[in-house]
Every structure is written in structure tokens, then in C-alpha cells.
Image (cartoon, helix red, strand yellow):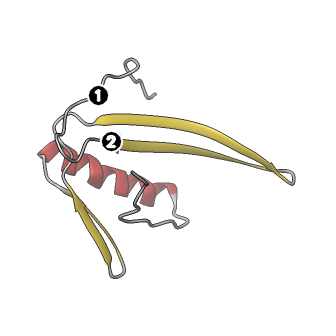
Amino acid sequence: MPEEVLFKSESEQSREEIASYLRKVADSLDSGNALTLKAGSESVSLNPPARPTFEVKAEREGPAGNMTELSVEFELEWDENDGEESSGSGQLEIE
């Protein structure tokens, strides 16, 4: 099945602003509440299961001219139909 983008927002933010968004996500996950994402007139609510797959990826993209771009991505994944957990690749540590 092709990928369907349900919501997308991209903007330059301060580190403090990004941390605030991530805290709100963490608070929703801790409390078992749905995650509601809003930007302008767009909105989507998602309810992750108790044990979704958590993917963390660090990438370097380039070269485009002399520019390389670094990124870190945090992704929660789950099967929309059954919410079964997937097997992981080992214990994640963030320092």
C-alpha cells in the first residue's frame, strides 16, 4: 500500500521550542492519551498502542554543492489494524 501523508509540518524552531513539543508528546504517551497534531486548518489525532515500535535514525545527506545536512528522526510505528508490537533491534540509549 502506498504511503499516505496524514499530516505534515516543517518549520525552523529554537531548540527550546522543539523540546516543548517533544515534552507534550511524551506527556501524551505517559498518560495514554491520543496525540493530536494541529497546524492551521490541518489536524490529525492518533492513538498509539501501549507498545508501538520506536525508531531513531541519524542521517547525513549530501553533497548538494558543498552542503551536507544532518538530521535525527524519531518515529513511532504500529499496525493500524491490530496494534501488535514488533521485534526490536536492541535497547536504545540516549545520553
Q: Is residue 57 left or right of residue 6?
A: right
Residue 29 coordinates in the image, percent (x, y): 21, 45
- Amino acid type of disc 2? Glu
- Residue name at image x 13 percent, y 46 percent: 32
Q: Amino acid at mark 1?
A: Ser
Residue at coordinates 38% horizontally, 65% vertically from top-left?
A: 7
- Secondary structure found at label 2: strand
Observer-nearest of 29 and 49: 49
Q: Taking 46 as reference, is 64 left or right?
A: right
Task: Indicate left or right for 66 with 59 as reference.
Answer: right
State which quadrant residue 30 falls in.
top left
Residue at image mark 2 = 77
Query: Of all residues shown, which one is farthest toward the front?
Result: 1
Q: Is 83 placed above or below 66 here?
A: above
User: For the residue carrying disc 1, how many other residues have a C-alpha within 10 Å: few (<14), some (14-19), or many (20+)?
Assistant: few
What's the distance in space between the residues labelled 1 and 2, CA to CA? Answer: 9 Å
| Residue at image location 25% in from the left, 42% down from the top | 79
In the displayed image of the protein, which residue is found farthest to the right?
65
| Quarter location, residue 81 | top left
Q: Position of residue 17 (x, y in %)?
A: 43, 60
Look at 23% across and 30% down and name the residue there.
Answer: 85
Mark 1 and 2 residues: CB-CB less than 8 Å, in contact?
A: yes
Whichever of callouts 1 and 2 sits on the residue coming sooner in the sequence is: 2
Residue placed furthest toward the top = 90
Q: Secondary structure at mark 1?
A: loop
Q: Is residue 71 shown above or below 4?
A: above
The residue that disc 1 covers is: 86
